[in-house]
Amino acid sequence: MKTYQITVGELIIDVARKNIKNLHLAVYPPDGRVRIATPLHIDDDAVRLFAISKLGWIKKHQANFASQQRQTTREFVSGETHYFQGKNYLLNVIYSPGYPKVEIRDNTHINLYVKPESNAAQRQQVIISWYRQQLKEQIPPLIAKWEPNMGVKVEDWGVKLMRTKWGTCNIQAKRIWLNLELAKKDPQCLEYVVVHEMVHLLERYHGDRFVSLMNKFLPNWKFYKDELNRSPLGSY
C-alpha cells in the first residue's frame, strides 16, 4: 500500500493506493480528516475529480464534526462530569494517604481517591489507569464470544489511546487494538468496535464483503457507529 497527500483547493486529502476495486471516501473525527482509498490503476487526476464530486458530502461531515460536543479540559476536581460506559458521573475527589483508586459510588457519582499532594496530571493518570483496567476486563469475554461465531482467532489484543480511530487490526499478527476512549462509551459500542476489527480477519478492506459480514454478525452495527461519532470526544 502506498500513502501520500494531494490537495483539492484548500482541502488536503490522504490517499491510500491499494489492490481494491473501487474508490472509498472517508471523513474521520475529531477534526474532519479526509482519506480516499483508490485502486492502483486510477491516477491522481481521477482521484481529484472524485473528491470534487464529493465536496458537498465532505463539507457536511466536517461541519458535523466541528459542531460536536467536546469535553472541556479536565482538572480532575470534585464536581466535574466524567463519562463511563455511556453514562455521565460527577467526580468526587477524596484526598487520602492510601493507595490511589477509583470507585463507582452510585448511579451519579465516581469517587477518586488520591494523595493530598497530587496534582491534576497525577489525578488524571489514576483515572486513565482505571479506564484501562475496566476495558481489559470487558474485552476478553467479547473476543471469546465472537471467535466461534466468526470462525476466527485473535492472537493478541491491547488498549491504547488513539486520536482518530476507535480500533485497528493487524491482520498478519491477528492482533487488535481498542481505543482507551471506549471505556467512556456504551458497552454495545465497544462490542461493535471489537466485531468490526475481528471482521477484518475475514476481510481486509471496507468494501461490499466487509459490509455484508458486518450485517450478518451485527445487523444494527451502523447505529453504534453513528452513536460513537455523535458522542463527546475526549480531551486527554
Image (spheres, grey):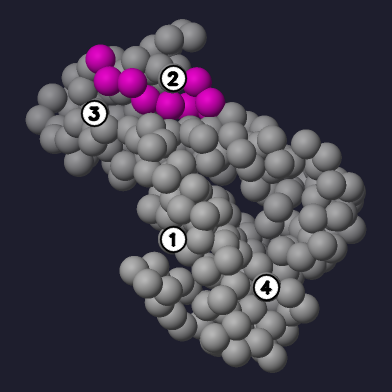
Instruction: Please name the residue shown 46% across and 42% down the image.
Output: 64
Q: Are marks 1 and 3 in contact (CB under 8 Å)?
A: no
User: Nearer the viewer's eye, disc 3 or disc 2?
Assistant: 2
Q: For mark 1, what is the residue?
A: 33
**Label 3 crowd (10 A; few <14 / some 14-19 / many >=20):** many
SS under mark 3 = loop
Q: Quick check: 43 above or below 235? A: below
Toward the viewer: 23 or 155? 23
User: What segment is highlighted magenta in the picture?
Assistant: 79-87
Q: CA distance from mark 1 to mark 4?
A: 17 Å
Q: CA distance from mark 2 to mark 1?
A: 28 Å
SS under mark 1 = strand
Instruction: Return the disc, 1 or 4, that comes first in the chain's sequence.
Output: 4
SS under mark 4 = loop
- The amino acid sitting under disc 1 is Arg
Quarter of the figure with the C terminus: top left
Instruction: Please name the residue shown 38% across and 37% down the image.
Output: 67
Q: Quick check: 118 above or below 89? A: below
SS under mark 2 = strand
- The amino acid sitting under disc 3 is Phe
Q: Measured from the top left, where is residue 179 in percent x and y?
A: 50, 50
Q: For mark 3, what is the residue?
A: 76
Q: For mark 4, what is the residue?
A: 23
Instruction: Return the disc, 3 or 4, that comes first in the chain's sequence.
Output: 4
Q: For mark 2, what is the residue?
A: 88
**Label 1 crowd (10 A; few <14 / some 14-19 / many >=20):** some
Instruction: Please name the residue shown 63% across and 42% down the image.
Output: 225
Toward the viewer: 144 or 17? 17
